[in-house]
Image (cartoon, rainbow, N blue to C red):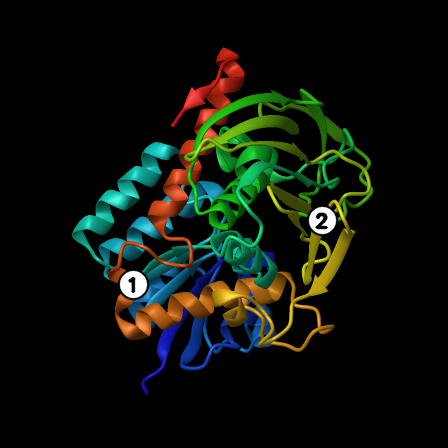
Amino acid sequence: MNKLKVGIVASGMMGQKHADALHRIPGVEVIGIADPYAKDLSKIAEDLGIPNAFSDYREMCETLKPDILHNCTPNHEHFAVNSYAIKHGIGIYSEKPLAASLQEAQELCGLLEKHHVPNAVNFNYRSNAIVREMRARIREGRTGKPLLVHGAYLQDWLMYEDDYNWRLDSAKGGASRTVADIGSHWFDTAQVILDQKIKAVYAKLLTVYPVRQKSAGEVGTFGKKEEQGTYEPVPVDTEDAGMILIRFADGTYGNLVLSQVSGGYKNALKISVDCAKCSVRWEQEEPDHLIVGDREHGETKSYAASGEMSGDANFYATLPGGHPVGWSDALYNSMRLFYQAVRNGTFKEPKQEYATFEDAAYVMRIVEACLKSDKEDCWVNL
């Protein structure tokens, strides 16, 4: 079996996590990494076990001719890298968001109609074993009809006025921050669990710090800022938090709280689907636990466990119970699905279990609907 050759674009946190996951997938070889901003890319490449390093991803592609590119660049660079790959017949696995705007996302989907290359976007939470277990139980009717959905995605890494990162710059991060960065993951996860598209939203968004104090040194995403002697005030025009009402295609309602300024919450994605027979709940910070609630027994908790899951959830649970499967495993699962589809030639089929560019463009529609709803103070239909 010939190995699929992969190049990674950008060497930050996500580029490194992609490399880790790719090394776990049989038949895949990471042959190069490109990053014009890294201070010591050769050392990063060596540490990641990648043989070639380039300052320009186009030079990497021309020199090494990879089969697939992994796009781990900042948001505003997604479109350029994604469109380059599609136009040059290279498969593309992109970080979210798909592009900086819905218009760019739709243009990428249009390019794929002409150039049928493998494509995926990293919504990795959909590939957690418990997320799939929730979907399987609802599909099988074991929970009864979904009555309502509620959840949150809470973080605290931007809770102080002098916290600053490129994601706060709308020219780089896009018109939405909290909804686009973390709300998008919740939207995708909820749609997978319910097998339903989100069809309407009502959003109230808030910017806690319209002006932030930016230090001289750049702070990496989730990184700790160094103590700096000087700060400059910088206006912020993206949201720090929000509350969103949701209506799914089958009429089920939900609500969602989002925040990047909530102390003590690190990466707290939570979702509960309350059904006629029981509720099923997943909390990302305890990623291998399913919580089931009913009136007779209160709450019970079960583990993700290989061979003990429902439906296709067994594909996503690779370890015995009590051996936690978490964030990195979900990322690996998504990539494993993608590369299986590439190998089998099934990536051209319209429906995939990993998130495609079309799926990601729809999530961007939800994000833009939230911005419009907040501005116009009304429900917005998709």
For the residues bearing labels 1 and 2, Cβ distance under 8 angstroms: no
Q: Nearer the viewer, residue 79 or 277?
A: 277
Q: Looking at the image, can residue 16 be seen?
A: no
Q: Which residue: 41% across, 45% down?
A: 360
Q: Which residue: 73% across, 57% down?
A: 286
Residue found farthest to the left = 114
Q: Earlier in the sequence, mark 1 or mark 2?
A: 2
Q: Nearer the viewer, residue 191 or 309?
A: 309
Counting labels gives 2
Residue found farthest to the bottom = 1
Q: Which residue: 29% across, 63% down?
A: 347
Looking at the rendered structure, the kind of residue marked 1 is Phe
- Residue designated by label 2: 293
Mark 1 burial class by Cα count in 10 Å: few <14, some 14-19, many 20+: many
Residue 224 in picture, x, y percent from top left: 76, 48
Q: Nearer the viewer, mark 1 or mark 2?
A: 2
Q: Is residue 159 above or below residue 271?
A: above
- Residue designated by label 1: 347
Position of the N terminus by quadrant? bottom left
Q: Nearer the viewer, residue 368 or 208?
A: 368
Quick check: 296 left or right of 28?
right
Q: Looking at the image, can residue 361 be seen?
A: yes
Q: Residue 147 sits in which quadrant? A: top right
Q: Secondary structure at mark 2?
A: strand
Q: Secondary structure at mark 1?
A: helix
Residue 371 in picture, x, y percent from top left: 50, 23
Alpha carbon distance from label 1 to label 2:
38 Å
Looking at the rendered structure, the kind of residue marked 2 is Gly
Position of the C terminus by quadrant? top left
Mark 2 burial class by Cα count in 10 Å: few <14, some 14-19, many 20+: some
Residue 271 in picture, x, y percent from top left: 63, 44
Residue 112 in picture, x, y percent from top left: 24, 51
